[in-house]
Image (cartoon, helix red, strand yellow):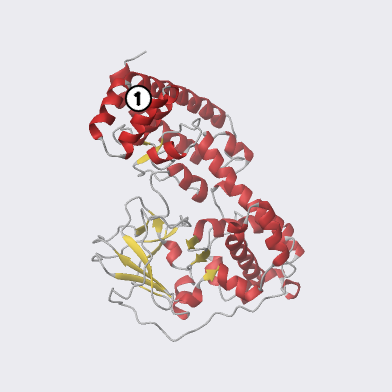
Amino acid sequence: MKTKNMISAHCFIFLASSSITAAFVSPPSNPISTKIHHPLHQQLSSYIEVDESAVRDTSSLTQWAEGYGAQTVAGITSYDGVDLFAAANEDIPAGSAIMYTPANMFISSYGAKEEFGTLEKAEKMIKDLAGEEQFPMFYVFVKLLCEYEKGTESPWFPWLNSLPRVFDSGAAMTPTCYDCLPPLAAKYAMAERVKYINCKQALKEVDFISEDTKKNDVVTKWAYNVLGTRAFEVGEEMVIVPMADMFNHGSIPNVEIHYDEEGSCNAYTTVDVPAGSPLLICYANPYNPSALFAKYGFLDENAPATFCKIMDIIPSTENRNLGLSFSRMLFYHENGGISEEVFDVLLFEHLSGEWQTQKDFYNACMNGDVDTKAAYHQQYLGDVMGRLKKHVDTFLIELDKLDEKAASKDIETHTRIPKIMAHNAFVREAFIRVKQNSIDPVVGYE
């Protein structure tokens, strides 16, 4: 299961679904108990096995979900022995309701805080380490560990026991992995690991989680990866929606998630979906596959573009307005095109020694003066393309070095190396196409 966190305007729509005719009937409330469990009374034999060799048990998931009021179109749950995902078992028309999860099944930061109360000491530590924005993540992390310690007594046990044990996200990677990634992907991946470390540090201040669990890196890392790869950001809160977490990512999604007036989750198709097709939502900006790779551990091979990897420009209000962004300065994967923002930002930086010319160019961009902007680009085309050529050629050499380093590693020990090399190969393909189709024809071959 590839999972989600970030709600992007590019991909999702989260709305009240009152304007759409619901195909499912809301069942009577069957609230899941949120009583705090004290792990000293728990028998270890009923704990969920979460080490990477443990087998996922998906056999009772659907029955469990239906028992708490969830509803799905028959047969959309598929399991291939590795991934549990949603797919159409027959043709599904656009606008069809395909999944309903009542709010009482959610695992959420607000629900955890209501259950546990404010964890003041832990919040203080999180605030000092990372800031208040990580509070919701931490509360869901604690909730998952609390339910883990209840074992078979947890109302969420069948769902927890169906979850992956192996993750390839940045939080699951090692320093060796980071060392084989390009700078931006490594930065994203290491940031995920830092978030995990922050959560684990603050866990020391939670007295109802056992010391055995706190010290168990396998368990705490598993809980963090479940959180990091399955939670939605909804406003300032964080929510995991069982069953809806089966939707895989797609750059061109065919499913939208809506919330009804009671806060329950409804999933609808947005287009006609042929039988056998995966049912997909979009987790985050599809134009930044390195960020998706670091957060979720999968490579979106259908991503239309990747960031151009120019990272030596000091941000300013002006160059941000021109498009200085990981999601706007793009190299297109299929045709080797270069986004307009790359040229605008690079020319603006090139003109830094000519203040009035730089100002005139910037104003032309901001005011929509297409002719003046085009004239400046034509005048300085050789300079901008020369810088691009140097950047692309240098980056391709760096990718070769990273691959040599990765190929020298034992994949039995460093199991994520093949996926890292696949990520690097995807980036290389985009850069080679940009070089062949957009740069060399203008600058020439050297």
- Identified by mark 1, the residue type is Lys
Residue depicted at x 26% and y 35%? 369
| Residue 392 appears in the rendering | no
Question: How many labels, in total?
Answer: 1
Residue beneath disc 1 = 435
Asked which quadrant contains residue 433, the reply is top left
Query: Percent x, y for residue 315?
Result: 49, 36
Residue 107, given in percent of the width and then of the height, sits at 54, 69
Location of residue 117 by image quarter: bottom right
Circle 1: is it few (<14), some (14-19), or many (20+) Cα within 10 Å? many
- Where residue 322 sits, quadrant-wise, is top left
* Closer to us: 186 or 402: 186
**Residue lying furthest bottom:** 28
Q: Is residue 322 above or below residue 31?
A: above
Image quadrant for the C terminus?
Answer: top left
Asked if residue 105 can be seen in this view, the reply is: yes
Which is nearer the eye, 345 or 331?
345
Residue 403 position, x and y percent, is 51, 29
In this view, 152 is above or below 357: below
Query: What is the secondary structure assignment of the residue under circle 1?
Result: helix
Which residue sits furthest front?
Answer: 356
Identify the residue at image location x=34%, y=28%.
Answer: 434
Residue 240, given in percent of the width and then of the height, sits at 50, 65
Residue placed at 48% from the left, 79% from the top? 68
Horizontally, residue 272 falls left or right of residue 338, namely: left
